[in-house]
Amino acid sequence: MLTAVLSLSGAIVYGAADFLGGLAARRLGAVLATAIAAVSGLVVLGAALPFLGGEWSPEAVTWGALSGVTGALAISLLYASLAIGPMSILSPLTALVSAITPMAWGTIVGGERFGPVAAWALGLALIAVVLVGFVPERGAVRPSTRGLAFATGSGLAIGAFYIIISQTPDDSGVVPLVLNRVVNAGLMFAVFGVLVLLARRSSRAPALAAVRETTPRTDAAALAATAAAATPPSPASTPRDRLVAGFAIAIGCGLLDAIANVLILLGIRAGDLAVAAVLAAMYPAGTILLAAIVLRERIAPVQWAGLALALVSAGMLALA
């Protein structure tokens, strides 16, 4: 039961972080917003480390650093796939693959076994992952081979993150997540620096604007863009105001993301990797709920069905 509660809570918080990340990406560009979020998450985890504790063993450091690499790869592939589209197909595909990968690892390699109720619940949860992750999109076309490859690769990388983080020692506390943030921030700032240099090379005109235009946005960023298009710009708003707001939102994103990772890590350690990973893949739920509340976005009936199914499957897993 504890695994189900922690993992599903982590998924909702992570979805909220993704929502803020989308808003920050509109102002700063996805790469810079992700890098800032990684740093703010690192500060939060570093401040919590004395209270939560953790042994700095070689295993904790190694697995934590590896999880940072897979996390950066997952984000890059996710942005690339959503930029190619259609999001209505590629977004739920990414979530599904991210759930199946650790689930298969846990059952085949880890030897995890489930009773009939838990098995049915996991099956319902996988269906819920697809329905919750569905992004309504008008005029969606058949996805390209490249888009499918990027979406699948992103899902595999997210699944690999869960597998890697599950290998960390129980006495390591949040040490692996601290290493995850260090590596993730370093890689994303390096990518941002390369993009800025390339932009300056091609033209000395606004490098940061070029980065923003060439950086794909997440589905949450697309929701933010829709709201911005529907709202008349404030005459008092200046580029500096938007930049400051973007930094503040990115910091908030990193805060929530760090909390979500702690919840998911605790969920994995409290029970089965397969259960924790499948429920953690419900993260789009947090995004669409916040989009409905903040941006007044309409939740599609198929997504409502997915949310209901997610709650049913989580309840079944908790009882099982």
Image (cartoon, grey):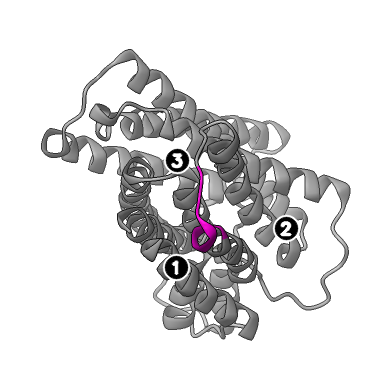
Identity of the amino acid at label 1?
Met
Front residue of 40/112: it is: 112
Q: Cα distance, mark 2 to mark 3? A: 24 Å
In the rendered image, the vertical position of residue 185 relative to residue 75, given as above or below: above
Rendered residue at 24%/33% (across/down):
173
Rendered residue at 54%/78% (across/down):
227
Q: Secondary structure at mark 2?
A: helix
Q: Cα distance, mark 3 to mark 1? A: 38 Å
- N-term-proximal mark, 3 vs 1: 3
- N-term-proximal mark, 2 vs 1: 2
Extreme residue in the left direction: 51
Packing grade of label 2 (10 A; few <14, some 14-19, many >=20) is: many
Packing grade of label 1 (10 A; few <14, some 14-19, many >=20) is: many
**Magenta residue span:** 113-119
Residue with the mark numbered 3: 35
Residue with the mark numbered 2: 90
